[in-house]
């Protein structure tokens, strides 16, 4: 192993409040960071950097932890351009939404699924994402859910079983039978490839009792829950997530005061996914309300071919600042440390001694430029596990 110092960093976001300015971002000005092997071993003022085997001059750029995208749906095939175009053109569009993707995904080969996954992963990495979670949910048969998760598990540790995305079309008239499949044979086939279990708890998908049965069955198989909660309407999803100690309640767009209070007194992160509201012209989730109540907030892309086809965390950061009441600092924290919390990880989402050396170099002097200069490709370098990618 060799050591490398990145010096002359104008602003280093460590997300360690014991460092630098003492803010949640633990911001160090005129900083350096030392990597040994896969890990960060030192951070501090650039002038005090210790001797190392290699030196890289950041030339006054900003460095922050790699983005942790804790919610995506990248095991899919097909295309829904026409659906998006119709929605944005104010035209009715009757073809099937998620069902369109299910049909295409079932027809795709394993190699097709892997090609689509790796193409989007490369795209995300170029934009600074060094950790991503991804879900099944477009197979909805025992065979198709299990093979999607097998493909995913070859590329990330953060794999989520979402057999309960919608009721499979062939069982639309018998949702109880589908829940029995999801909690039985399908779960048995999928559990070996997954760390998490998720359910779309929403009117038209799965109600609170069904969602509780699905997540409880997953827990019994060693999977930890996360929940698609309160996206389209008020409902039981957030309360259920807190009840079951889910790592994350995702979307959180329609919340009662009791929902906000429950999140604030739990270890469940509220993961906000503004790409979905952007792509469906829906009302934004109120990040300010959650933060003021003391809720831990994460930002993620929800990258999927239907309702949020973006892999760009910087885009989500800019939306969160412009439209959801977050400060630039809060949005950067949510997209890095917040994502790590939503995955219950402490080895990522921060740049302090002991953390993995997953980092982003911006062609800008400050992390604030992510929201100050929206849409500009500011990510110039990405390091993952101590290697420049
Ligand atoms: Zn989702």
Image (tube, grey):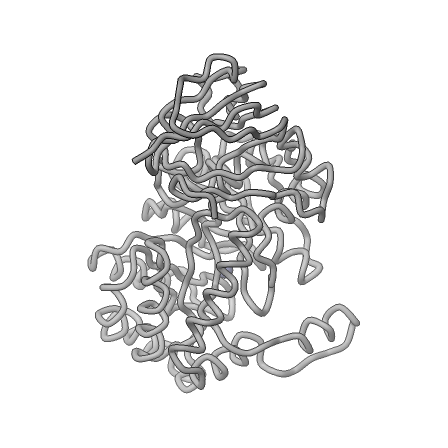
Identify the residue at image location x=45%, y=78%.
112
Toward which corner of the image does residue 308 lie, by quadrant? bottom right
Q: Position of residue 229 (x, y in %)?
A: 48, 54
Task: Report x, y in % for residue 377.
Answer: 67, 47
- Name the residue at 49% across, 63% down: 202
Vertical order, 303 against 66 (above or below): below
Task: Pick the residue in front: 69 or 185.
Answer: 69
Above or below residue 92? Residue 289 is above
Residue 86 seen: yes
Does residue 293 lie above or below 31 as drawn? below
Q: Quadrant of the N terminus?
A: top left
Q: Residue furthest right?
A: 89
Name the residue located 58 percent from the left edge and 76 percent from the top edge. Answer: 97
Q: Position of residue 17 (x, y in %)?
A: 46, 20
Q: Is residue 361 left or right of residue 222?
A: right
Residue 380, image x, y percentages:
60, 43
Q: From this viewpoint, which residue is outermost toward the front?
A: 53
* Number of on-image labels: 0
Between 27 and 198, the residue placed more toward the observer is 27
The residue at 57%/57% (across/down) is 311
Q: Quadrant of residue 155?
A: bottom left
- Give the residue furthest to the top: 48
Residue nearer the viewer, 223 or 236? 223
Instruction: Look at the image and tell me whether residue 259 can be seen.
Output: no
């Amino acid at each position: 192993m060799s050591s490398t110092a990145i010096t002359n960093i104008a602003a280093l976001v460590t997300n360690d409040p014991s460092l630098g300015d003492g803010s949640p971002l633990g911001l160090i000005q005129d900083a350096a960071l030392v990597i040994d092997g896969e890990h960060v071993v030192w951070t501090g003022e650039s002038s005090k950097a210790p001797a190392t085997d290699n030196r890289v001059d950041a030339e006054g750029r900003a460095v922050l932890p790699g983005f942790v995208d804790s919610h995506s749906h990248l095991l899919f095939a097909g295309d829904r351009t026409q659906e998006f175009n119709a929605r944005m053109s104010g035209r009715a569009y009757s073809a099937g939404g998620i069902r369109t993707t299910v049909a295409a995904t079932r027809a795709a080969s394993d190699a097709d699924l892997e090609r689509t996954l790796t193409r989007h992963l490369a795209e995300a990495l170029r934009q600074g994402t060094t950790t991503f979670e991804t879900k099944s949910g477009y197979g909805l048969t025992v065979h198709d859910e299990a093979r999607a998760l097998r493909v995913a598990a070859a590329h990330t540790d953060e794999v989520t079983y979402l057999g309960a995305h919608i009721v499979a079309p062939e069982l639309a008239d018998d949702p109880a039978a589908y829940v029995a499949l999801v909690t039985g044979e399908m779960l048995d086939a999928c559990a070996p490839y997954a760390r998490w279990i998720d359910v779309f708890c929403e009117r038209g998908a799965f109600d609170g009792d069904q969602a509780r049965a699905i997540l409880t069955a997953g827990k019994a198989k060693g999977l930890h829950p996360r929940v698609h909660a309160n996206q389209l309407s008020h409902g039981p999803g957030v309360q259920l997530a807190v009840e079951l100690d889910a790592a994350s309640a995702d979307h959180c767009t329609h919340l009662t005061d009791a929902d906000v209070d429950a999140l604030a007194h739990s270890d469940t992160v509220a993961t906000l996914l503004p790409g979905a509201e952007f792509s469906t012209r829906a009302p934004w989730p109120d990040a300010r309300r959650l933060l003021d109540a003391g809720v831990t907030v994460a930002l993620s892309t929800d990258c999927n071919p239907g309702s949020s086809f973006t892999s760009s965390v910087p885009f989500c950061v800019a939306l969160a600042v412009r439209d959801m009441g977050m400060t630039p600092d809060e949005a950067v924290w949510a997209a890095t440390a917040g994502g790590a919390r939503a995955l219950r990880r402490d080895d990522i989402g921060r740049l302090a001694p002991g953390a993995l050396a997953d980092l982003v170099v911006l062609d800008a002097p400050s992390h604030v430029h992510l929201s100050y200069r929206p849409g500009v490709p500011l990510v110039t370098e990405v390091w993952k596990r101590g290697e420049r990618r």
